Image: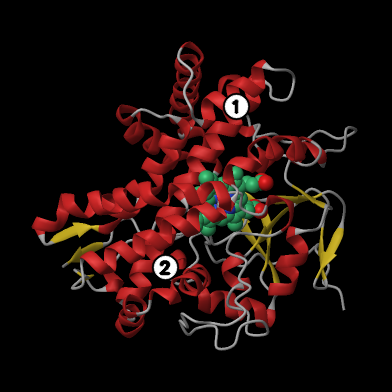
Amino acid sequence: MTATHPSIHLDPVDITAPSFRANPFPTFKRWRASRPVVPVRAFGERAWIVTRYDDVMAALTDDRLVKDRRNVRDPTKKHREVWLPGFIRPLQHNMLETDPPDHTRLRSLVHQAFMPRLIAKMQARIHLLAHELIGHVQANGEMDLINDFALPIPMVVISEMFGVAERDRAAFHRWSNVAVSVTKPLDGVLAIPNLYQLVRFLRRLFHEHRLNPQDDLTSALLQAEAEGSQLAEDELIGMVGILLSAGHETTVNLIGNGVLALLTHPADRDRLRADPTLMKAAIEELMRYSPPVLFATSRYAREDLTIAGTQIPKGEMVLAALGSANYDESKFEDPETLMLDRPNNQHVGFGSGIHYCLGAPLARLEASIAFQVLFEQLPKLRLAVPPEQLRWHSSLITRGVKALPVKF
Ligand code: HEM
């Protein structure tokens, strides 16, 4: 049977609310059982959440679901556009918000740099960084694991890859974080001054690198731009903007959520410390069990289509619930149990299809070194507050706590 849409009842759950982000799994379970494609309000409009594993995988590889809304437009109709000042519009010219052929061209320009073989070269640097960060706090006996450890690791690594000076990193994170935290149209308007600063900063970064080229990715991309029409100036802003931002706003949550899960499961933490060969599988299980990215970014139906018996009208937003797919009982045995050595763990935490996470090898490397050094250097690490008191970010895509006070 097919559900039709004229009298659609929107589910009242606010998927951006901190209380939902803290524990979305019971709601996802209810939806998977009773309403596997559920309409909610998101970004001020109707969005269809896809909740079951097989449907999520199919949605992520379905070319009728596009990323760039302009590819859905009916030229004979008027459409409500979200207005953005021209100055910040280049930020949207990035691979995650484009469809082939532009997506293919943009991704191929940086694909090489993120291959596992090249990323592995950064191992020693990440080790040193993790040790340095712990050295800064060791004498205090306590820290905020997010600000003192989980955030600086990906932040410093991605900044060094792109040649972002130390003096600019805190401000860059602030601007990018405002952009990542947009959950409704009004936030989008309020974020404009930050996005303006972000674009100004990127233009300055390019200017400095043009004057003084470095052995980094910013200079390599400027070179590609100078050599021909491979990369337009606007696309350069979109490219470096998305990589700097996606390069740290997500991994911070893999480290933060992962440490939280391990500290609330001390037997697993002890097992991991005693047996480093478990690390590879443990990273995948932590990705599944406490997803750093709860939903894939928005996609739009290029035509009327049906998913799991539910009709989705052309032009409407579809959100693939990665965090729900990762708990689908038809795919994962005992999904609510943290099982560090879970066999054949095919979680979708890094997405699937042509937009599959470009930075997955880097995120995995950073997290594995972070966990290893942290639990080795601070064997008495424990939470300084009960988990119920932790405050979660209000967000749509990323999922993490604002602070994680720990003692050691
Ligand atoms: C644990 C950390 C990370 C998680 C959980 C994560 C998750 C994801 C997911 C789910 C997607 C697909 C989104 C969609 O299809 O809508 C994605 C795409 C992407 N990620 Fe990551 N990511 C992480 C780390 C990184 C890092 C470190 C970088 C860069 C250095 C990065 C760069 C990207 C880029 C550029 C895309 C878009 C790829 C494309 O459109 O072809 N990510 N990520």
Name the quarter where the C terminus is drawn. bottom left
Upstream in sequence: badge 1 or badge 2? 2
What residue appears at the point 49 percent right and 14 percent down from the top-left corner?
207
Q: Is residue 200 above or below residue 100?
A: above
What SS does tag 2 mark?
helix
Q: Position of residue 92 (x, y in %)?
A: 63, 33
What SS does tag 1 mark?
helix
Three-letter code, disc 2 = Ala
Q: Position of residue 371 (x, y in %)?
A: 35, 65
Q: Quadrant of residue 156?
A: top left
Residue 270 as seen in the image, left or right of residue 194:
left
The answer to whether residue 155 is visible is yes
Q: Position of residue 381 (x, y in %)?
A: 21, 70
What crowding class fits label 2: few (fewer than 14 Cα within 10 Å), some (14-19), or many (20 or more)? some
Residue 313 as seen in the image, left or right of residue 335:
right
Specify the farthest residue to the left: 139
Name the residue carrying label 2: 22
In depth, the one of 32 and 279 nearer the eye is 279
Three-letter code, disc 1 = Leu
